[in-house]
């Protein structure tokens, strides 16, 4: 099988983890990396044995040997970088949050669909084996009707007004960085909410440093989500159905462990993720590219848009604004 040739756009923390996981796969290679600086691109290329290192994102985007690009820049650049890739005819896996707001997300998706190009938000939790097992339990009815979800994702970061977590000009805040995973779980299992409400404690830089969110769904189900960048939380997720319940253990967005209690019988499953855990979403991207799909049924465009609209709604309630809103 001819390997899929990845281009990695940016050389930060998450770009390194993804490059590591691509390296473990037989049907893919990192063929090029692009950075704002040639020195950073060279260092990255040396670390991962990447043949082409570019000192600009533009050079990477226009490399004809690149089949697909992974956008790993801070939140406020996802729209701009993804659009540039798409305009050059490149399929994209874009880090979460897909965009700063639903308007940007819609534009990116519309462009990709019009030009028959694959694009996906990198909600890697959706492809983690323990998540897939949970979804199977939900779809087969083993848990009964899902009535409630509780999910939390939070850690205590040092307050730094210019870091991407706290700087509103970089799309900072707990919701876009961490809450997005809990929203992705709720939307997967319950669909589009018809009621969205929440309370946020804002930082000195006016981003949500912690938030409590409640979603209501047409079925009567509710989701209760907490996210935080200044508070360590339990980081697990619990799903309650009419026949049973399930717990995705910490860290719920990439768990190895799933506990179920169905008809009163408890079962503990350990389903290990591979490497850092990104390999599973990469396998899906490869499958979609090889089969000519423009979106993944596991992380479809409609879910990305639903999540972006919920986040817009919450930010409006909290008075958190980003450039371009
Ligand atoms: N999937 C996950 O598990 C996961 C985990 C963490 C973060 N993320 C997401 O991944 C994205 C990147 O996060 P990260 O933790 O990798 O961030 P990071 O370590 O700060 O890296 C971001 C990279 O983006 C590039 N960049 C371009 N403009 C920049 C600017 N104005 N300020 C800072 N960096 C800039 C830089 O690469 P060059 O200098 O090479 O251009 C930088 O190394 C975020 O959207 C985040 O939400 C995902």
Image: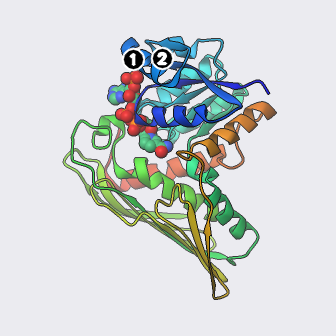
In the rendered view, does 178 fall on the left or right side of 4? Answer: left
In the rendered view, does 52 fall on the left or right side of 75? Answer: right
Residue 174, position in %: x, y? 36, 51
- Above or below: residue 53 compared with residue 133: above
In the rendered view, does 325 fall on the left or right side of 269? Answer: left
- Above or below: residue 266 compared with residue 230: below
Residue 160, position in %: x, y? 21, 42
> Going 29% across and 48% down the picture, which residue do you hit?
207
> Going 68% across and 37% down the picture, which residue do you hit?
285
- Quarter of the C terminus within the rendering: top left
- Above or below: residue 160 compared with residue 194: above
- Above or below: residue 189 compared with residue 94: below
Q: Nearer the viewer, residue 93 or 281?
A: 281
Q: Nearer the viewer, residue 109 or 24?
A: 24
SS assignment at label 2: helix
Colour scheme shown:
rainbow
Q: Are marks 1 and 2 in contact (CB under 8 Å)?
A: yes
- The residue indicated by pointer 1 is 36
Residue 20, position in %: x, y? 53, 34
Q: Which disc, if any, is residue 57? A: 2
């Amino acid at each position: 099988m001819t390997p899929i040739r990845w281009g990695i756009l940016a050389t930060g923390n998450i770009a390194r983890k993804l490059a590591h996981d691509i390296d473990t796969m037989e049907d893919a290679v990192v063929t090029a990396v692009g950075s704002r600086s040639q020195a950073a691109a060279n260092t990255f290329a040396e670390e991962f044995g990447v043949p082409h290192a570019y000192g600009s994102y533009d050079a990477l985007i226009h490399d004809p040997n690149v089949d697909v690009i992974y956008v790993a820049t801070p939140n406020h650049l996802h729209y701009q970088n993804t659009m540039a890739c798409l305009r050059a005819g490149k399929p994209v896996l874009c880090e979460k949050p897909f965009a700063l707001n639903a308007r940007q997300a819609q534009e990116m998706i519309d462009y990709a669909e019009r030009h028959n190009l694959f694009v996906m938000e990198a909600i890697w939790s959706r492809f983690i084996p323990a998540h897939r097992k949970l979804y199977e339990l939900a779809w087969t009815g083993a848990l009964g009707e899902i009535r409630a979800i509780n999910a939390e994702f939070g850690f205590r970061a040092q307050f730094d007004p210019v870091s991407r977590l706290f700087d509103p000009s970089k799309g900072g805040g707990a919701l876009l960085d961490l809450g997005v995973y809990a929203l992705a779980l709720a939307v997967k299992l319950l669909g589009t909410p018809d009621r969205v409400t929440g309370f946020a404690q804002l930082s000195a830089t006016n981003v949500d440093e912690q938030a409590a969110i409640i979603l209501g769904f047409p079925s009567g189900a509710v989701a209760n989500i907490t996210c935080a960048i200044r508070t360590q939380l339990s980081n697990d997720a619990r799903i309650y159905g009419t026949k049973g319940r399930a717990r995705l253990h910490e860290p719920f967005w990439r768990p190895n462990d799933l506990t179920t209690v169905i008809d009163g019988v408890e079962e503990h499953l350990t389903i290990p993720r591979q490497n850092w855990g990104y390999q599973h979403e990469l396998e899906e991207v490869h499958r979609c590219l090889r089969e000519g799909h423009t979106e993944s049924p596991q992380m479809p465009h409609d879910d990305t848009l639903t999540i972006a609209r919920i986040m817009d709604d919450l930010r409006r309630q909290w008075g958190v604004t980003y450039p371009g809103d």
